[in-house]
Amino acid sequence: MSKMWGGRFTKKTDPLVEGFTKSIQFDKKLAEYDCIGSLAHINVLKKAGLLTGPEYKKLEGGLKSILESAKKAPFKVDDAFEDIHSYIQHLLEKKVGKAALKLHTCRSRNDQVVFDTKLYCLKNITVTLDLLSGIVKQLAKSANANARQAMPGYTHLQHAMPVSLYDYFGAYVEMLSRDAKRMSNIFDNIEIVMGAGALSGTPIDSSKYSVKMMPGCSLCSPANAMDAVSSRDFIIETLSALAIIGMHLSRMAEDLILWSTKEFDFIDIDEAFCTGSSLMPQKKNPDVLELIRGNTGKLYGNLMSVLVMMKGLPLSYNRDMQLDKEPLFSSFEIIQQELKVLAGLLPKIKFKKNNIARQLEDECLYATDMADYLVQKGAAFKDAHTIIGKLIAYKLKSGKEIKKMGNEALKKFHPALSSKVIRKIIDPEQSVKSKRSVRRKKR
Ligand code: ARG
């Protein structure tokens, strides 16, 4: 096994050091992007007159065939190599012989690894955006399918005011649409550069680095080589955006877990998306949703580990940066898996409308509507708040329903109150409709 370095060493690397420093076990995921980078690089070398036509052809043929196998997962690698860059160099030497020794002209793995990781991000942001758009569409569908279904809305997890399932799902449509925008902005900010060398550039004229790599993606030389090899803010931004998506999905998971409990009993989650208990025969558990909630810890941890790893690193490249890849891969995998599993689970949720309707009978949910009614009748809101507060306190103490109190009792609280008015106010659909300040979008 040949290394990409070693000339100045007289001793063999200690096997413990080999094992401790290698990254091939995880950076093999970059194989495809490494080949694409090398194909762009040989273009630069050819333009700069550093490769002959036949050498270029040989290298191109070799790299393209490695690229083909790298695209077919799983790409088998030899774990004895230090990293994916050394392994592909080795494969190329085996395929095309001596010409491969020119591949690493005017480049460094420091430059290469950033290039590969940026391409990996672009690809995976695209995949994630596709999955996100599927979920957003599904949520909009659920919103429309249940457009008129009211439900109790909560603050502090206590009955607050009626809301609609349209608005509930709409809330997540808004959150996830912002997430998609955030991810697209990150995509747009990632600049694909090459030519930083190890840290100070290469002798090749920067104009030669203007290379078309693939549709929608071109290469240029960096504005600053030290920045190019040693900045990882694109990874931190990506991890942050993924952590935020995870947080949103976790909140939705928590709602659905609560709604599937005997205590709420608002929804039924399809059996195919639940698991059982090895001891308690009756159990149908929402493990999928619990894992979505639990994964948030990993997503935040991944973001934190890269933020902390980068803090205080002197310019420019340091080997610490090798540790950015596992958290990045992990966060993308988690979010993509979560979005895939939710795409199956969400459309199969069944709403138990009778149980929801029973909760909507709680007259306390309409207390604010009653106060708003008194305001319409000329009361100051603070007074209306106190009057309805007293009415609620009386109801709770006496156990009487406000609906059944009769005009005489109601008018003691405020002359504008009557059974007829109360019956009109205690209506979930009416309550939702009466909130006109929201620009409800068509979904
Ligand atoms: N495996 C390294 C990384 O991920 C690649 C760059 C290695 N560069 C070096 N000078 N040792 O960061």
Image (spheres, rainbow, N blue to C red):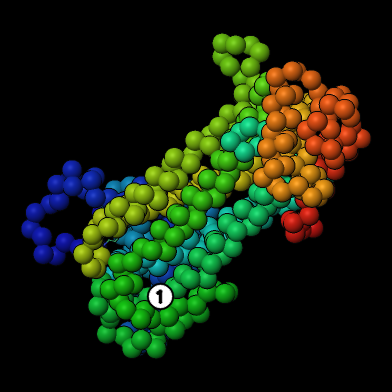
- Secondary structure of the residue carrying tag 1 is loop
Q: Is residue 419 above or below residue 12?
A: above
| Residue closest to the far right | 420
Relative to 109, is 403 on the left or the right?
right
Mark 1 lies within 8 Å of ligand 1 (Cβ measured): no
Residue 436 placed where, x, y %?
Answer: 78, 54
Relative to 333, is 370 on the left or the right?
right
Residue 289 placed where, x, y %?
Answer: 59, 34
Relative to 14, is 87 on the left or the right?
right
Residue 282 placed where, x, y %?
Answer: 66, 13
Location of residue 193 (image quadrant): bottom left
Q: Is residue 207 above or below residue 289?
A: below
Identity of the residue drawn at 30% across and 67% down? 230
Quadrant location, ligand no. 1: bottom left
Is 301 in front, or is 419? 419
Is 289 in front, or is 28? 289
Q: Amino acid at mark 1?
A: Val
Identity of the residue drawn at 38% across and 53% down? 325
Identity of the residue drawn at 44% across and 84% down? 210
- Mark 1 residue crowding within 10 angstroms, few (<14) / some (14–19) / many (20+): many
Q: How many marks?
A: 1
Q: Quadrant of the N terminus?
A: bottom left
For residue 440, say whether it is visible.
yes
Q: Quadrant of the C terminus?
A: bottom right
Identity of the residue drawn at 70% across and 30% down? 390
**Circle 1 is placed at which residue position?**
193
